[in-house]
Image (tube, rainbow, N blue to C red):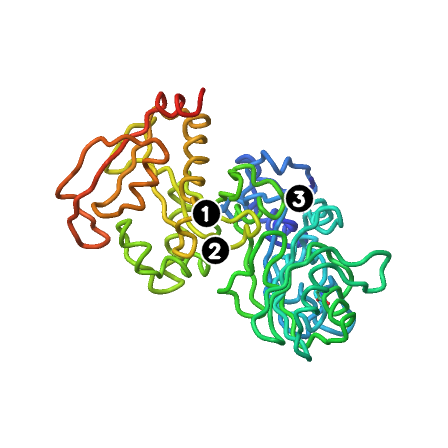
Amino acid sequence: MRLDRFLSETGVCSRTEAKRTARAGEITVDGKVISDTSIHVDPESAQICFGGVPVLYRRFVYIMLNKPDGVLSATEDGEGETVLDLLPEKYKKMGLFPCGRLDKNTLGLLIITNDGKSAHELLSPSKHAEKTYLFECEKPLSKADVRVLENGVDIGEKSSTLQAKVEIESSTRGKITVYEGKFHQIKRMFGAIGNKITYLERISFGGIPLDASLSRGEWRELDDTEIKILTGKAGDMLKTERLILRKWMMSDAPSMFKYACDPDVGPIAGWPPHKTIDDSRVIISHFLDHHPYCFAICLKEDIIHPIGCVELKTKTDLTDKADELELGYWLGKPYWGNGYMPEAAKALLKYGFEELNLGAVWCGYYDGNSKSKRVQEKLGFVYHHTSSDLPVPAMNEVRIGHVSLLTKDKWSEMNNN
Ligand code: URA
């Protein structure tokens, strides 16, 4: 790729500015000052500096925009404002386009990217990428209306719409999830049952929820996990019969807060209830930065809203050996008593013993937490010792803690390996 194109596509400067800067001797490639910006560079391997600052090459950019009312989902429009006009100048030369369309008066999540292949795959009818909308409609919805919307409705195409999911919040308000993206689909579905959409906001797309911290018109780049989920490259997901364990995303903060604010959830595991969504955001960023084997537990049918957390922790009070980690977990209270925790932890233990080659996994519970004790017994952990004066710094307490151990041999024996 030409150097001037590289600099403009990475949003550093225009081609003209690149020329000027090169003449001033301020551009280097692999340490050599470059005066001719028409030279070809390998963007993947060349070390390019602009004004002494290294330029990071990102082949593709993925942006989440909270689309406001009245803006067009187009790349250019003679008259009105487009979603691209809401982005800063540095993105203008990157060949970005909206991945699918929202009507001018539809609000919410719009992905903007320059990754044509992934966008094409996401939008292809066979992919069935899910899209969830908050809606308000003119007339009250009857149970029969909901059944029709869910089972497929004739909107004048060759075939009826695919199965959808409707969650009613009041007779004229709710959420609808569809797995296809026909032109004006939601408005036409409601039109077909003699109703009319009066408000429409997309709150998730392709497994990515709209980040609740973005106001209308605000945007941010997707984080690595979100990109993997969106582009179907989340190979580091673990699957069980009923659950998907995936990496945490910054946009999970409201879902985490919903359960982590419950005084019955954190304190029994040694951490205080979250007071605000920002508390949850801080914890998630810590997971992303420092906890490589920390997974959000999601129900298979709703990979967007985690219901708990399971983790193999490194360097804990119980062990600092490289081939021994500590299992930790919590689950939102509404999901207790269904066997979800052992199911999630079992998948992570399999990953730990088979993929990470662990020799043993430690686990503990504070005295009186009989639910956690039962989880560990179900997983095959064996009682090891009790500490009678265990500091619990986050709670400013000292507690009795029971520690158990699962060795690889015991795990292999239980799993007939
Ligand atoms: N369905 C619609 O009717 N409009 C949108 O903007 C998106 C889905």
According to the picture, the residue beneath numbered tag 2 turns out to be 252
User: In the structure shown, which secondary structural element does the residue marked by tag 1 occupy?
Assistant: strand
> Does label 2 or label 1 sit earlier along the sequence?
2
Q: Foreground residue, 118 or 26?
A: 118
According to the picture, the residue beneath numbered tag 3 turns out to be 37
Residue 216 disc label: none
Count of residue discs: 3
Q: Foreground residue, 227 or 388?
A: 388
Query: How many other residues sit within 10 Å of disc 3, few (<14), some (14-19) or many (≥20)?
Result: many
> Does label 3 or label 2 sit earlier along the sequence?
3
User: In the structure shown, which secondary structural element does the residue marked by tag 3 occupy?
Assistant: loop
Q: How far apart are labels 2 and 1 at the CA level?
A: 9 Å
Determine the residue located farthest toward the front in the rendered image. 144
Q: How far apart are labels 3 and 1 at the CA level?
A: 46 Å
In front: mark 3 or mark 1? 1
- The answer to whether 285 is drawn above or below residue 67 in the figure is above
According to the picture, the residue beneath numbered tag 1 turns out to be 296
Image quadrant, ligand 1: bottom right
Residue at position x 69%, y 58% from top?
98
Q: Residue 370: horizontal and vertical position, in percent?
A: 27, 45
Q: Residue 323: horizontal and vertical position, in percent?
A: 34, 26
- The answer to whether 124 is drawn above or below residue 87 in the figure is above
